[in-house]
Amino acid sequence: MDTSHNLHGALDANGQSVYRLSGLSKLIPRMNPESPFASSSQPGGEVVVPVSALNRAIGTMLERSFPLVWVAGEVSNFTRAASGHWYFSIKDAQAQMRCVMFRGRAQHAEFTPREGDRIEVRALVTMYEPRGELQLNVEAVRRTGQGRLYEAFLKLKAQLEAEGLFAPERKRALPPHPRAIGIVTSLQAAALRDVLTTLQRRAPHIPVIVYPAPVQGAGVSAKLAAMVETANARREVDVLIVCRGGGSIEDLWAFNEEVLARAIAESAVPVVSGVGHETDFTIADFAADVRAPTPTGAAELVSPQRVLLLRDLDHRHATLARGFGRMMERRAQQLDWLARRLVSPAERLARQRMHLHQLSVRLASAGARPVRDARGRFSLLQMRWQRWRPDLVSHHAKVDGFAERLERARQRLHERQSARVATLGARLEVLSPQRTLERGYAALLDAQNGRALRAPSALKPGRRLTVHLAEGSADIALSDVQPRLTEGF
C-alpha cells in the first residue's frame, strides 16, 4: 500500500484554514468483484465504494498522519461504562473532540476526570468506523500543568526524603486524649466546617483553636508555615490539624512547598495532614506525623469519640465497683479467719508441746530410716551381683576349646598352603628356562642391546652375539651366515 498520502493546509475563500487529504484513493482497498460489498462502476467509469471501506481508509490515514500528541481542554459528558472504558469530550471555547480511554489504560490513571476539569490527554487521532465519527484514543491523562508540577513535586519529595524528613522514626504517636486541638486552615474553607462539625459531634468537651491562614494563592505556604510555628510557640494545643478541601494539583500546590514541609517536620506538636481527597498526596502528607485521607478523617483521628469515652467510663466504674465489693468480701473473710486463730496462751502452749513431741518422734524415725534403707539397698545389690556374677570355670573351658579348634585350623591351613607351594614350585621348575637349556637348546642375544634373536634375517656376518647354554654363556662373532627355512626339529 502506498503510504505517501499527506495532510495539506490551505485557505478557503473566507480566509479559514482548510485541510485536504491526498493519497486517499490509494488507501481504499480493491474489492472482490463477487463480494456483495464490492465497488461498482458507473457508465462514466466512476468507482463507487462502500461507506465502511471509506471510513476504514480515512481512519488508517489519520492514524498514520497524526503522531501521539498532548491535547488540552475541559472535560464534559464524562461517562464510565460498565466495561471500565471512559467516554468523554474535551473542549475549549471554539471546539470540542470526543475521546475514549479503554479500560486497560484507564485503570492506571492517577485520577478520574470530573465534569469541568482542565486536563491534558496524550492521544492518537482515530476514526470510529461504525458511526464515521472522529475521536481521540486516549493513552494517558493528567491535569493541566501537571507534567511540570509533578516533576517539581517528585524532585522536592526526593530531596526531603534524602534529608530524612519523611523517616518513620521521626513520626510521633497522636495523644489519645488531647486537652486542646488546633486547626491550621482558612476561615472560609469548607474543610473547616467539616472538621468543626466532626469535632462537635465526636468530642464537644475538647476546646478547638483555629490558626487562620489562606490555603490558595501566592505566598500561601509561608503563611501556613508561620501558623504552624505560632501554634508551637503558644503551646495551647496537644495536636495540630493542617487541612483544606479537594482541588486540582494547582489548588493544592501550597501544600507541596518546602517551607511548609520543614515547618511541619520541625513542629514539637504532632501534626495530622488532611489535604484534599483520599487520592490526593502532597509533600505535607509525607512530612506530617499522620496523613488523613480527608479533613473529616483528620478530625476523627485526633478526637476520641465522646460516646465511646462515656461508655468506657461507665464500664470502668462498674468494674471498679465490682472490684471494691469483692475486696470487701475478701477482707471480711480474712477477718473471720484471723478471729478463729485467736486462742488462749495455755492452749497455744499445749499445741506447741504436742507439735514438739511429734517432731521428736519424726526425728527418731528419720535417724533410723537411712540405715534401714541402706541395708535394703545393699542386700538388693548383693542379690543382683550374685545373679550376674560370671561362671569363670565354664568360660575357661570354652576358651580352651576355642584354642584347640584354632590350633587345628591353623595346622590344616598350613598343610594346604605347603601343598599348594610345592605344586606351584613343581610347575615353575617345569617351565624354567634353565631346564630348556639343559635339553640342548641355546639362546642367542644381541651383544649390544641384549635383545633375543628369533629370525635368521637378524644374523649378519661380523655381528657379535652372546650365546647362553645350560652350563654358561659365551661371546661369539659370526663370520658367515646362510639362512634357511626349517619346518621343525
Image (spheres, rainbow, N blue to C red):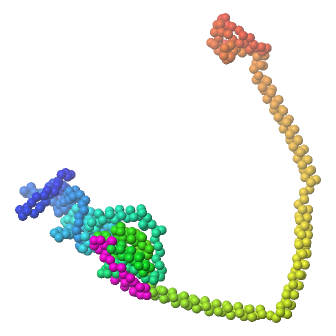
Residue 7 within the magenta-colored segment of the rendering: no
Residue located 37% across and 84% down the image: 196
Quadrant, the C terminus? top right
Residue 341 point in image, percent of width and height? 77, 92
Q: Residue furthest right?
A: 393
Residue 177 vertical placement versus 384 (above, below): below
**Above or below 290: residue 340:** below
38 to the left or right of 224 = left
Q: Position of residue 183 (x, y in %)?
A: 38, 79
In which image quadrant can residue 276 be found?
Answer: bottom left
Q: Is residue 215 left or right of residue 380?
A: left
Q: Residue furthest front?
A: 233
Q: Is residue 21 left or right of residue 284?
A: left
- The reply, left or right, for residue 5 in relation to residue 249 is left
In this rendering, the count of numbered labels is: 0
Image location (x, y in percent) of residue 151: 32, 62
Decide whether residue 209 is among the magenta residues.
yes
In this view, the residue in front, 488 or 272, is: 272
Residue depicted at x 31% and y 70%: 253
Q: Residue at x 84, y 33 (%)?
A: 418
Seen from this angle, which residue lies furthest left? Answer: 13
Q: Nearer the viewer, residue 419 or 224?
A: 224
Q: Is residue 105 visible?
A: no
User: Above or below — where is 360 with respect to 433?
Assistant: below
> How far across and how far down the image is residue 102, in percent?
30, 66
What's the magenta region?
A: 193-222
- Dividing the picture into quarters, in which one does residue 291 lie? bottom left
